[in-house]
Amino acid sequence: MFGTAVAFVLLAPGAPVPAQPPVAAPKADRFKAQEFARIVWQVGDQVALRYAKPVEMRDLMRGAIRGLYDECGLSVPDRVNVALARATGATEIVEVVADVRLLLADKPHLRGPRALAAAINGFRHATDPACQLTSPRASAFASSDMDFGIGVELEGASGPRWMLYQAEYRAAIGQVATAGWLGPIPPPTALASPATFPWRVSRVIPESPAQKAGVRPGDVVTHFAGTEITAKNVDELFLKFALPHQTFDPQTGLPREIERALTFRREGVKPFEAKLKSTPYTPMSAFGVMRTAEDKWDCLLDREHKIGYIRIGAVEQNLDEKVGQILADLERRGCRGLILDLRWCPGGYVDPGVRIAGLFLPSDVLIAKMNYRNPQLAGNQPEIRNTFGNNKYTKLPLVVLVGQETTGGGELIASALRDNDRCVLIGQRTVGRAYIQNIVDGGFGGLQFKITTGESLRPNGKSRQRKPDSGPLDDWGLRPDEGLEVPVTKDKSLELKHWADLHSLRPAESNEALDFDDPLKDPFRAKALEYLKQKLGPLPAKK
């Protein structure tokens, strides 16, 4: 049991408590608070075992307590820190966490699963900001946070807000246990919509039903199933719209398509309705110059000089196969040089990223070094070499475009090519993210916890990771080659990304002209074309 001296420090009526006046907790609440603390401890135990650096359980629990107070907009009282410092052994530390939960029992920001989310996300204070809770993905795709099965994401309905909504919904319908939750479980109809009102589309995923219907980011959903969405009915309609996004045929057990009738408003355009079915689809994440009538990408950017262009989005499973098919088509058309655009690559799955780099590298060359705290664990290989390349494109002149949003897997591809002298880098310095992360059970609501288990290094052994104390002169991320930096303002960078997004979403049958169609309007591609033309030299004489 919890030591009486520590219990007195936290719960004595005479002690000032910023969170709430101390009250005698009912036995059921005390039990729930202890249950809560044990769940936090169990997840922390998995973090301590797997985290990239040694971390003490006391420090993780200190982070959890801070997470609870942060969520309420409060500072951790000194007496709580004293109690935690005096606690000896796991049992007493767990009881301190339980007492803190009771002290904050009436805080609305900690209702239901929110307290567990705040505490477990508080582990970042003892580890790093990349360690955090995440919801089970709506699909198996790296590019999708929550697309409701139709390729649309709404402002607000992503990240922690969406994650907690899912947990509350599952608890309300009895799908998940509510261990450690204080207070009553609200019915599904009482849940507040995580999507901001009005419903504004924040993202459309290429190749999805929404993209094919012409939906764009910024569009506002005004009606659902013929009913106008208002501030009064938005919670009710979101529940019907979002959960679940699939039903199953009782005879076959297979997913059954659900059709959603949505009316969209867009500035300068007449309101339009789209009937979107939750049809299975594979997001498109390799883009070229223009879509063909067959809804494929023509990737020859400069037809006269035979310069190809491939832009990579999220690194999805099997993306390397699609890139290989594009390269084969470019080879048939006499491609003499290639621009590989990684400016807006957010990373994704490691294996296809490694294989994309391997397409341009000789066999067995080093692609990345891996630095793990526990290299002896299964799967923790110390380095990755190219066992995937077919040696077909090892001599193809190559320019890689990088920018301030090139992240993780995009940086891995770029560093593998640059350190093996297979390309030049043009653009701007990259994000600097190289943490290797794995998933552990989040302990509640079907949620998962992303934990940093190591770091990937460049083939030359340098770190790509930008640390919290890294300065502008420190060695993190990737810099463009000397003389090949593209100085653009932040506003111009945002504009270019917007152009590229619209270009990705333009339906194949559309004749709409877009700014991204002209590479000379894009200073990155303009510089890459200039560089490759000089490198390739005069055009071959026509026979």
Image: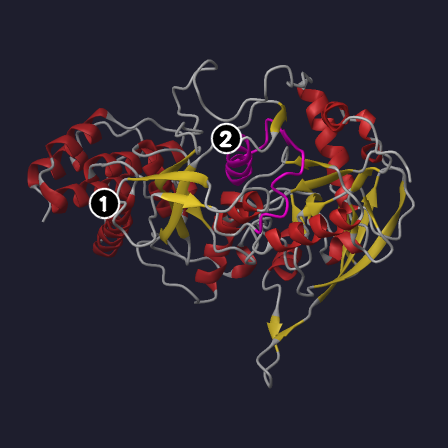
Image colouring: secondary structure
Quarter residue 247 falls in: bottom right
Residue at the extreme bottom of the image, as rendered = 251
Q: Position of residue 100 (x, y in %)?
A: 25, 39
**451 to the left or right of 248:** left
**468 to the left or right of 215:** left
Residue on which the image places disc 2: 419
Callout 2 amino acid: Asp
Picture residue at 36% right of the left edge, 59% below the top: 178
For residue 35, above or below residue 306: below
- Specify few, some or many for label 1: CA neighbours under 10 Å numbering under 14, 14-19, or 20 or more: many
Residue on which the image places disc 1: 98
Callout 1 amino acid: Ala
Q: Position of residue 370 (x, y in %)?
A: 37, 40
Q: Position of residue 93 (x, y in %)?
A: 16, 41
Instruction: Please tell me which residue lies in front, 280 or 228.
Output: 280
Q: Which segment is the magenta one?
A: 390-418
- Specify few, some or many for label 2: CA neighbours under 10 Å numbering under 14, 14-19, or 20 or more: some
